[in-house]
Image: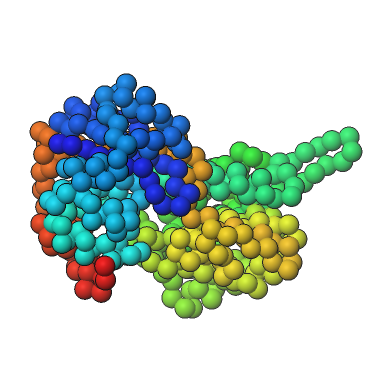
Amino acid sequence: MRIAVPAETAPFETRVAIVPRSVGRLTAAGGSVVVQAGAGAAAGFTDEAYIEAGASIEPNRKELLSTADLTIVVRRPSADDLRLLKPGSAIIGMLDPAGDPGPLLILTERQISAFRMEAIPRISRAQDMDVLSSMATLAGYHAGVLAAYRLPRIFPLLMTAAGTITPARALVLGAGVAGLQAIATCKRLGAVVEAYDVRPAVREQVESLGARFVDVGVESEEHQDAGGYAKELSADAQEREHEVLGQHVMDADVVITTALIPGRPAPVLITRDMVAGMRHGSVIVDLAAPGGGNCELTKPDEEVTTQGGVLVLGPTNLPAALPGQASQLYSNNVTRFLTLVVKNGQITLDFNDAVVAATLMTHDGLPRGEQMLRLLEGATS
């Protein structure tokens, strides 16, 4: 099996799908790894490091893609790249079909078996394949650091001969993987941290990190779906949520929001009126920017400074700011996934396996699952 690792072409994408350390595991599974020249450079992995690990280097992208039995990517390639894939081959990556269903037509026409890593189910045996959790860990950490850097004051309590500096106040909305990392990072940097989530089960985790859990009065176990994600609140519950959170938002120097469900619009947790009540110099880091943002003023990948001097940041790919470690974690996730679907150098699928069923988008020229069928019906290439 010829396994191709092309360079990423999405704007500002610095990660690479496979790092040199994973090459040996892929060759042991019966694959020969071919990496596009320079694919790992932005993440700190040289062509020489791949060669030493047992991979070969291909400078011609068209040759690389058109001869591969399996292509491994971080982000969905362009339509032109997908048309280069060998008919009957396979592709693995964060393919985001809901973001642009058009490529589904190409994948079905070329009979490509496509696996979307962002759909790995949150079950115990798939934890080491969960790319969303891996990337969220880094995003939550970096959000805390970014907020501290952009806030025009220091985070910790500081007692000096010239006087005492009170600690900054941070509020984290959403206590999933990213939120918990943001809490831990802000706490380590010295801030007083509060956190909120509609799922009461996370209270213990929030408090174990030294943060105060904000009670809104709408928290319920019913607000968590089977995948562990928070469900959307009713209109009455949202009104109560905004009413209580408003004061906490206005008291905060930093707000980090993380409430995002893949494939769905992000819920609005911070209204423009709340932002208007925040102190001059306050910072909002909205990790839900890919879904439109948890703040009404968020603009994806842009900085917005309000008339009141509040800075709203909407980064959509913070893991790319830590490309070496992000690539390492992603590569480990993908490699573990491949041990499930590659046997003796061939892709062997068990369609009854929960991980395969959740991630497989297309196979043998057909969409897999009702969601892919609906997306394909509305797709244009």
Q: Position of residue 157 (x, y in %)?
A: 74, 41
Residue at the image position 21 percent from the left and 50 percent from the top: 85
Q: Residue at x 10, y 48 (%)?
A: 350
Which quadrant would the N terminus be assigned to in this image? top left
Asked if residue 375 can be seen in this view, the reply is no
Residue 249: give x, y in percent of width and height. 64, 62
State the colouring used for the structure image: rainbow
Residue placed furthest toward the bottom: 235
Regarding residue 367, the answer to whether it shows in the image is yes
| 84 sits left or right of 325 in the view | left
Report x, y in % for residue 163: 87, 41
In the picture, measured across the screen, residue 125 lies left or right of residue 74, that is: left
Q: Quadrant of residue 60?
A: top left
234 left or right, relative to 312: left
Could you say which is closer to the camera, residue 164 or residue 34? 34
Give the residue drawn at x 26%, y 34%: 34
Q: Measured along the vertical axis of the image, is residue 234 above or below residue 184?
A: below
Q: Is residue 315 above or below residue 244?
A: above
